[in-house]
Image (cartoon, grey):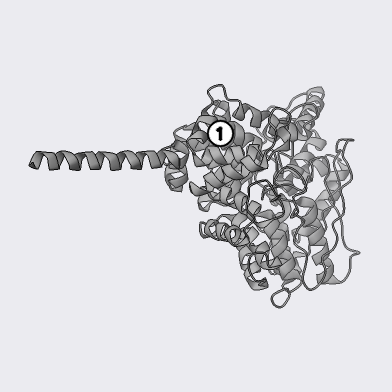
Amino acid sequence: MHERIIMKNVRNIFYLLLICTLNQVQYGLTTEGYKWVMSDLDSLKEASSKNDPFAQAVLSLAYVHGDKGLSISLENAQKLARISADSGHWLGLFALGYIHRFEPLGPNPEIVRNYYLKSFQDPDGQMIKLAARKDPIASYVLGEIFTSDEVRPDVVPDLQLAARHYEIASQGGYHPASVQFALFKLHTIVEAGMGIEKDLTHGVKLLKVAAQHKLPSAHHYLGRSYFKGVGVESDLEMALVHFQAAADRGYGLSQLAVADFYAYGVTGPPKVDLAMRYARLALSYDEKSALNKINEYQKILTGDSSNVASIVQVDAPSSSSPLKEEPNPPVPIPELPNTTDSFEVTRLPSPYASNNLTEDSQPALPVVNLSESSISQPSLPGNQGYNEDKINSDTDRSNEISYPPPNLQNTEEMCEDAKKLYWGRGVQVDYIGAKALFIQSANGGSAESARYLGLMYLRGKGVQKNLETSVMWFDTASKGGDTLAQKNLVTLKAMLGK
């Protein structure tokens, strides 16, 4: 009798364990993606440093999204995605395609398409197998692919499937997916027959949960909800709280929104110095809009637009198309930076979607009289960490001038080759390769190459943004007789108050 009771209890325990195991499989709790979603940042970084390609790709996406408490850094994301993709890992391939949707590497639909399809069509089918087990990372990736027009006609976008995969990933604890699923719940993308219930309360709840985990995009869209009164009562002070939380972690759209809040005193007295600061932070996200804001706020400070100078354009490709001017915001409540709310297109816009500003155009940079502002030129977020790949010091140019001077013909050829890499003329954009050639060419006496290096450090293209180093290179080019560099040097020194 006693033995039968023991055996019965053993069977009950076995069944309970079996049910728990099945439930874990059901919700992806035993998969590798779930493990990294639930892991802390230190564990993820440690695995990445040990060349785990899955961990490297997850960390890359964390830098893109500002996940796990990180500040957004596409530079760090690119390095990690490249390492993972070079090993052939499906998630590294996806991550490399994903970051080519944004400045400074994109938007480049062809590259996005190439890497997305390589990830989706992985011969081992690892992503599909993991998604079938409801792995949150794999489900999120499928959601992104099914909302991407770039993959046509090989893969037909399907918003219903995308929403389902975002929901699964969200239930698995992946907060970037929660933001995407929230957009389905909050906006007019929901159509009859899609089987996706529009639910403002649920959408806001998803954003609040993701915001509790400090995800910048969640804060940004909560800011929009409070600003417009979508799913919550309109509250401009709460909107600013969330916009600023996102802006301080490197979220460009929120940086522009916060700048307008302070410039026009939406929730208190105007603070144009703070507006300038956030507009300058947004330079790496949307240079044209940020420059327009800086120019706008400069006029507020001085009441005179006659002192506006410009950084002169370098030779941009002839195929560059004119950029549309953005309207000035009304006073006192500004329009938020232009993002799609109606979702007329078949792809659900990513919270990190670019405004299609291309490398072809370098808009004018107005002089900012920093003596009239209590905030000095800030460093852009996301420039820390993963600097083991840095070739040279960004503060000591003497480290870069170490190559034997090539002859004049090679110098000119290297400059032309470097420009091809810089602009992506017939090749893939490669700022690191361009920088190396520009350095050798500049050391050989090319003033034009020195000017390009000045621009690279000015805009943070392939290097950490550093205005002092930019000044040094412009000065070298100017002394070499480059007239464009001379004009750029005057403007940049004015910005720095020199």
Where residue 337 appears, as percent x and y from the top left, is 75, 58
**Residue shown at 22%/39% (left/top)?**
11
* Residue at disc 1, secondary structure: helix
Is 418 situated left or right of 86 in this image? Answer: right
Which quadrant of the figure contains the N terminus?
top left
Considering depth in this image, is 284 or 92 the residue closer to the camera? 92
Mark 1 crowd level (few <14, some 14–19, many ≥20, 10 Å Cα): many
Instruction: Name, please, the residue furthest toward the left.
Output: 1
Is 346 located above or below residue 84 in the figure?
below
Rendered view: 66 above or below 231: above
Q: Nearer the viewer, residue 446 or 237?
A: 237
Q: Residue furthest bottom?
A: 269
Question: Residue 260's quadrant in the figure?
Answer: bottom right
x and y percentages locating residue 16 in the rendered image: 29, 43
Quarter of the image where one finds residue 78: top right
Which amino acid, by three-letter code, is at mark 1? Leu
Pick whichever, 204 or 71, lies toward us. Answer: 204
Question: Could you tell me how many numbered marks the image carries?
Answer: 1
As drawn, the residue found furthest toward the right would be 306
User: Could you say where residue 158 lies in the image, as x and y percent from the top left?
Assistant: 67, 38
Instruction: Residue under label 1, please give it.
Output: 91
Q: Residue furthest front?
A: 1
Residue 242 x %, y %: 61, 64
Q: Is 67 situated above or below 402?
A: below
Q: Please say whether residue 239 is visible from this viewpoint.
A: yes
Taking 333 as reference, is 50 above or below it?
above
The reply to whether residue 249 is visible in this rendering is no
Horizontal side of 264 relative to 159 (left or right) equals right
Residue drawn at (56%, 30%) of the image: 90
| The C terminus, quarter of image | bottom right
